Image (cartoon, helix red, strand yellow):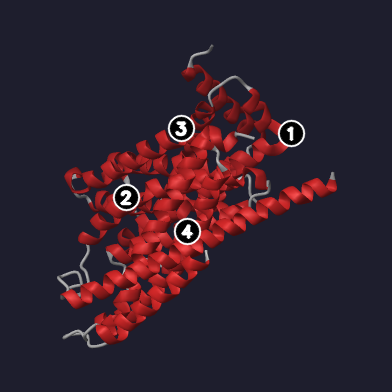
Amino acid sequence: MTAHAILTLAWLLVALYMIFIYAPSDVNQGNVYRIMYVHVSSGWTAMIAYFLVFVGSVWYVWKRSPFADDVACASAEVGFIFCSCLLITGPLWAKPIWGIWWTWDARLTLTFVLWLLFVAYLLVRSFFINPGRAALLSAVVGIIGFVDVPIDYMAIRWWRTQHPQPVIMGGPNSGLPPSMEATLFVSAGAFLCLFFYLLRQGLRLAEARREIGQLRRLLSE
Amino acid sequence: MMHSLEIIWILFLKDLRLEWRRRETLASICVFGILVVFLLDFAFQPAGEESLRLLPGVLWIAFAFAGILGFNHSFVAERENACLEGLRLAPIDAGLIYLAKLLANFLFLAVAEAVIVFAASLWYNFSFLPAFKWFVVIVAFGTLGYVAVGVMFGAVASNTRMREVMLPVLQFPVIVPIFIGAIEATTSALKGDAPGQFASWVRLLIAFSVIFIVLSFLLFEYVLEE
């Protein structure tokens, strides 16, 4: 655990160095584009977190292992943070480049829906009357939410291609120079490392909670 | 062992009988739906051409709000007198209970929608008759997909505190495709477009309905499990 913490910290520092010093300025966007390294890394991490919620949910419904439920829950909690980070850095980047904070374009709309699904999953979890059933019911919510995402994607894509779109500059995906690409991968790796560190903390917390519950029951007997 | 369709039919009739005795759900969702249309009429004050642009959105917002009330009530009613325990004890597949609830809620919402459409037609001075056939098809499939998710989440939300809030929080992000598809198709149909123009949206509504009915049918036993 400590080794993981040190690795995460070191990796994040390297990523910070690469983002602000190693990577060159962009010809068109100047220094503003550097937010991409945080933005894209948060996005990838949020996707992985969402996928883990689904995996944990299916695994729980199938095997009923409390660990699977912990994975789904912890990864929803951490994923929500990364998804929020994605939604905060997005408009910060969009304002100087597109001139607007937000547009209902396909990808933005889908990200917002994803964020809502994270919120729904976490909210419903904390509101179950009988905590004993929380794991199974939230697994059902996790599965339905995940199946919904590709359909959302299709619907939103069709919807947006039928409407006029604001003029948007070609995204950074239109080919990155090697130094920028390296920076992106290093920072994405650092975010992923941080994600797994936080996930493990979440798992430990869940385990401790369960242990305390058992001890309490023993005491009251 | 009874035939599955027979079981669904019996459970469906049970919900209808319950509704006939109390007349709670239908009355409340119809009134609520009309109120939504009424308020939106104040909000937008549409005149002439505008009503065609606003009407599909107004209708689907009213349908969605009315539906949410119904789904909430559908499972809260089962909590009284431990009716849900009784259902769970019956030697039947939980998926069949889901399908029966789906049918009953679809019927209730369809009745409310007819009332809402009638009211909207008067207040917006708009005739649905020219495109009526396609309008009905679109509303039917949109409602089916909406109810498919709503019944499932209604059952989940009935296990939570503040379920009146939890149901929309769960439901609305998931039904985004239904909302987009239904509003786009309704707008296109009411404008008088050829069916080919909005066929892909109707296909999306059908695909969504099929996927979520199958998924909920399979998962429903876990929702009822104690």
**Residue type, label 2:** Pro
Sequence-wise, which precedes: disc 2 or disc 4?
4
Q: Which quadrant would the C terminus of chain A be assigned to in this image?
A: top right
Where on the picture, by quarter, is residue A137?
A: top right
SS assignment at label 2: helix
Residue on which the image places disc 2: A150
Q: Identify the element where label 1 is drawn.
A: helix
Q: Residue at position x 20%, y 77% from top?
A: A179
Residue placed most toward the observer, B121 or B116? B116
Question: Residue B179 bears which disc, if any?
Answer: none
What residue does disc 1 label? Answer: B81
Residue that label 4 marks: A118
The chain ID associated with circle 3 is: B
- Mark 3: secondary structure: helix
- Identified by mark 4, the residue type is Phe
> Relative to B211, does residue B1 appear above or below in the rendering?
above
Identify which residue, A22 or B152, lies in the foreground.
A22
Q: CA distance from mark 3 to mark 1?
A: 27 Å
**B44 or A181, which lies in front?**
A181
Q: Are marks 4 and 1 on the same chain?
A: no
Amino acid found under the numbered disc labelled 1: Asn
Question: Could you tell me how far apart the alpha carbons at marks 1 and 2 are, in whole angstroms?
Answer: 40 Å
Q: Are the numbered discs 2 and 3 placed on the same chain, yes or no?
A: no
Residue at image point 15% right, 71% down: A175
| Tag 2 and tag 4, C-beta contact below 8 Å | no
Badge nearest the viewer, 4 or 1: 4
Q: Amino acid at mark 3?
A: Leu
The residue singled out by tag 3 in the image is B218
Tell whether A47 sits left or right of B32: left
Mark 3 crowd level (few <14, some 14–19, many ≥20, 10 Å Cα): some
